[in-house]
Amino acid sequence: MKKTVVAILLLVFLASCGKDSVFIKARFSVLGDSYSAFEGYVDPDSNKVWWGFPTIGVTGPELMWWSLVADETGWTLEKNNSYSASLICNMEHDGYSEHSYIRRMNNLGNPDVIFIFGGTNDVFDEVPLGDYIYANWTEEQLCMFRPALAYLLDQMQQIYPDAKLCMLIDMDLCSGGVDVSVRDAFIESMHVVANHYHVKCIDLNFIIKQKWHPNVDGQQSIATQILDAFLKDNDYLKH
């Protein structure tokens, strides 16, 4: 109930202040999976998208979390490089390994903010966690979650030195699909690796889903929690 009240107050605050009076102008990109991929709104447009959003009420791109964030902040979406069913790591996954986050991370344009939203498919497939490795990665290690995520953040900080990286973490990943202890191990790993690289994490709670994907309320919840986090980030607010 408390979180619901906070979310309502946040939306009222944003509506009363106006978009441009709160946030500085910025460009943002998304590196994601099917949670963020909408037909006709991915870049490159050859990326695979999940067909089912219209069947759960998300009938247009304006209902996706990244569109809601853009509307409220006045920010510009530079690139949405999201690919359905993709893994963060390079483990072979029904032919999707060539579309891993690692292999798409260098195609995000020139954004000020990058949202990295993933891990769902790594968790669902229960890919090997591996060890926490922060340098000299081997190809074998990049097929494991922890070293692959470390490599991803390490390389992205070099490719986009002026961008703020932000990891969006679904705290209820694959609920009902995998054992809770498996899910929690992946979530803990994301926090540990992100903390090592001083990357901002936004823990997303209460994402309402249908067919394993955020529905209209779920998309709004994601956007609201992102906005709440960035309202506390003075670097992106007008003073």
Image (cartoon, grey):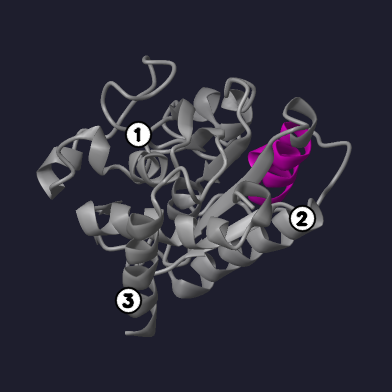
The three-letter amino acid code for the residue at tag 2 is Asp
Q: Nearer the viewer, residue 201 or 13?
A: 13
- Residue 35's place in the image compared with 181, above or below, is above
Q: Which residue is mark 3?
A: 4
Q: Quick one: label 3, few (<14), some, or many (20+) residues within 10 Å?
A: few
Say which label, 1 or 2, has the lower sequence index: 1
Q: Is residue 65 magenta?
A: no
Residue drawn 57% across the image and 63% down it: 187
Which element is circle 1 on? loop
Residue 169 percent across, percent down from the top left: 52, 58
Q: Seen in the image, is 67 located left or right of residue 156?
A: left
Say which label, 3 or 1, has the lower sequence index: 3
Distance CA(mark 2)–CA(mark 3): 38 Å
The residues colored magenta run 141-156
Camera-nearest label, 3 or 1: 3
Image quadrant where residue 11 sits = bottom left
Q: Which residue is mark 1?
A: 37
Q: Is residue 34 among the parts visible in the rendering?
A: yes
Q: Is residue 154 magenta?
A: yes
Residue 199 percent across, percent down from the top left: 71, 52
Residue 126 percent across, percent down from the top left: 50, 54
Q: Which residue is mark 2?
A: 131
Residue drawn 44% across the image and 61% down it: 225
Which element is circle 3 on? helix
